[in-house]
Amino acid sequence: MKYSLNAGEWNSVFAVPSSVVDRYIKLASAGSLKLILFLMRHGGKEFTDEQLIEALGFRREGELEDAALFWIQRGLIRYDNTSLAAAAVEAPMQIKLPETEDVQPEKKAKCGSFATLLRGLAQLVRRLNAVQLLIKKHGEVRLELSMTAVFLLLILCFWLVLVAAVASMCCGYRFAVRGLSFDASVNAAMDKAGDFVHDVANGGPHDTDDKSDDE
């Protein structure tokens, strides 16, 4: 008796470079894939346009040229005025085109940095919103502003806000904060600053009946 491997279709195989699948499977059209597989199946053999159109069943005008251009630009197909043939895989690319996989890591890094920045800004806004600036007179709160709003006002119109704050203290208004772990010390300092401005504006110390209470 004699024994042998029943390889079936595996008796006749040809190699396909990994890069064709790894780098181009998502980018190449169906016609481009048909063309490169056909040329690789026949090694370095050259084919005319008419032979390839007949073998691959191209029907649309320019379909072969479109399919071949994709691989010519990437250096995998050689072309002259009469024929096409598969190029050596090691041949340098004639035109270097950016591939999807080449730019993905950079895009992911940029997206990751941008997302981190947005998360940091969101956390900062939440913390600022938890703190309020109180504008009081005679111990009564007349207005409450979140620290986010205060920072925006300072950024957009710093000098106007500064003049308004000094004028308010001259008229007996005081400022306090709420929502910090050290409210008392901050409010005491702000009361002293308000009294000082009021005294300077009115020519000397006065009774502090309008002095705000610590929160």
Image (spheres, helix red, strand yellow):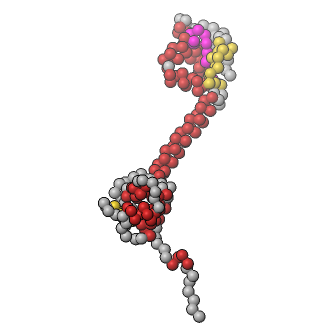
The residue positioned 52% from the left and 41% from the top of the image is 114
- Compared across the picture, whether 131 is left or right of 93 comes to right
- Compared across the picture, whether 151 is left or right of 71 comes to right
The residue positioned 30% from the left and 60% from the top of the image is 81
In the rendered image of this protein, does residue 205 appear above or below residue 13?
A: above
Quadrant showing the N terminus:
bottom right
Residue reaching furthest to the top: 203
The residue positioned 58% from the left and 24% from the top of the image is 149
Residue 207: image location, x then y, percent:
63, 8
Over which residues does the magenta segment extend?
168-177
- Choose top left, top right, bottom left or bottom right for residue 78: bottom left
Q: Nearer the viewer, residue 107 or 78?
A: 78
Residue reaching furthest to the bottom: 1
Residue 157: image location, x then y, percent:
50, 19
Q: Look at the image and say whether residue 176 sits in the magenta stretch.
A: yes
Quadrant showing the C terminus:
top right
Q: Which of 107 and 175 is in front in this view?
A: 107
Residue 183: image location, x then y, percent:
64, 26
Residue 14 visible from this viewpoint? yes
Q: Nearer the viewer, residue 36 or 126?
A: 36
The residue positioned 45% from the left and 54% from the top of the image is 60
Residue 189: image location, x then y, percent:
59, 21
